[in-house]
Amino acid sequence: MTGDICDFALCERYFGITADLYEPAVRLLAWLHEDQVGRESLSGIAELVLRRKNVSAAAALVERLRSHVAVFYPVRPEGSNVTLAAVMVDLLPSSVASMRSAGVPDDIVRATLRDFAIWADVHREKTGRPGISETEWNLLSLTGNILRIGRLQYESTVFLEPYYVCRDTRDGGLVILAADGVRVSVAGLPLAAGDDSRAFVTRLRFDDGVIAGNPIDTERGVIRRETASLRTDDHDLLLAPGMPATNIHIPADGPLTPELVDYSIAQAKPLLDKLGRFTPVGVCESWLLDPALDRIARPNSNICRFMHRFAKFPNATPGSAIVDRVCGWGTNALPPEKLPERTGLQRGLKRYLLAGGTVRDVGDILVW
């Protein structure tokens, strides 16, 4: 440590930070320690991240601090670019100690916090300057509520999607029913807004041990218009809005082979159980789960095999990150004919979009 500022060796070990980001970050951090607004903001952020685990409130405070830095910090625009990095450097020692004391092995702590390096690279790619953004996501890694275990990340959270997930006790099959009152397009996707004369509204009813509602086509990830019924004495409820769940995230830094995914899941289950955070269902929402990948990528590709592991449900938020993730940041604004064709996946995506295909982020369920 240098004074009360975390030294480079510790930051490099856990964050994978580079010197050209560390140095401006600690210059700003030293200034913040001397600045009244900076000191009080850092204290408030630490309380929100490390004790309350309220990353949305902490992220809002970081953005207020960034605005303060933009006006009062004498080195411009350096301060705005590295504000989040300075905050994270300040929180690192306490975050590591908190996770270690909770029983998280040090290799998992390091792997979890190394997500910093991925997003620092993204910031550099987008802006050409050292820094880090994606404030709320990056603060989450410091809370210990998300852990990277092997190839995947596991976040302990509460399920908020409008679906009821049941398992048939006779054959193990999954049935997903939409919650009551979801407005659905003719294509079977939730409608956020707008008029559609062909839309329908889901209904969910319970009477005399029978639940009736609109089922989800778990291969296509769409809501069906027709209703289905199930008996509660033949089905276990695995997941519903308000129940604890494990969100599975896919870091963008390596292959997604079946072996790596299997190993990650096998390691995650006992560790989450030991920490008192195991849930019977994992939930994932990603462009990597879009059934359209069968028409974009090779059928035996790693991403297609990953996509087929899950039972799908439609994401309530429209849109997809696939173009930016496959073709590069900012390419989502380009017309399909302008997209690059350097890789097989880029060529497949471009062909699909030029043929009128649509893409979306899809939600998925995995029963461990």
Image (tube, grey):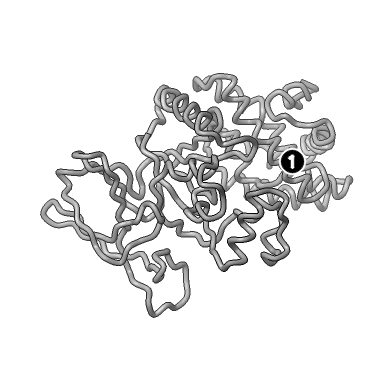
Instruction: Say which amino acid is labelled 1.
Output: Asp
Q: Which residue lies at the image location 39% right of the left edge and 71% below the top edge?
A: 186
Residue 267 vertical position relative to residue 334 in the rendered view, above or below: above
Give the percent coordinates (x, y) of residue 306: 49, 41
Residue 325 makes an appearance in the image: no
Q: Please identify the residue farthest to the left as the structure is shown.
A: 208
> Quarter-wise, where is residue 48 in the image?
top right
Residue 308 position in % (x across, y down):
44, 44
Q: Quadrant of the C terminus?
A: top left
* Residue 71 appears anywhere in the view: yes
Instruction: Give coordinates of residue 72: x percent, y percent.
Output: 83, 49
User: What is the tally of numbered marks visible in this picture?
Assistant: 1
- The residue sitting at 63% across, 40% down in the picture is 252
Residue 341, image x, y percentages: 71, 54
Frontmost residue, 294 versus 101: 294
Give the side of residue 245 with respect to residue 138, left or right: left
Where is 224 relative to 161, above or below?
below
Q: Quadrant of residue 188?
A: bottom left
Q: Quadrant of residue 243?
A: top left
How packed mark 1 is, by other alpha carbons closer than 10 Å (few <14, some 14-19, many 20 or more), is some
- Check the picture and name the quadrant holding the N terminus: top right
Which residue is label 1 attached to? 121
Task: Classify residue 169 as left or right of residue 285.
Answer: left
Q: Is residue 173 above or below residue 70?
A: above
Image side of residue 77 versus residue 291, left or right: right
Q: Secondary structure at mark 1?
A: helix
Q: Residue 2 or 315: which is nearer the viewer?
A: 315
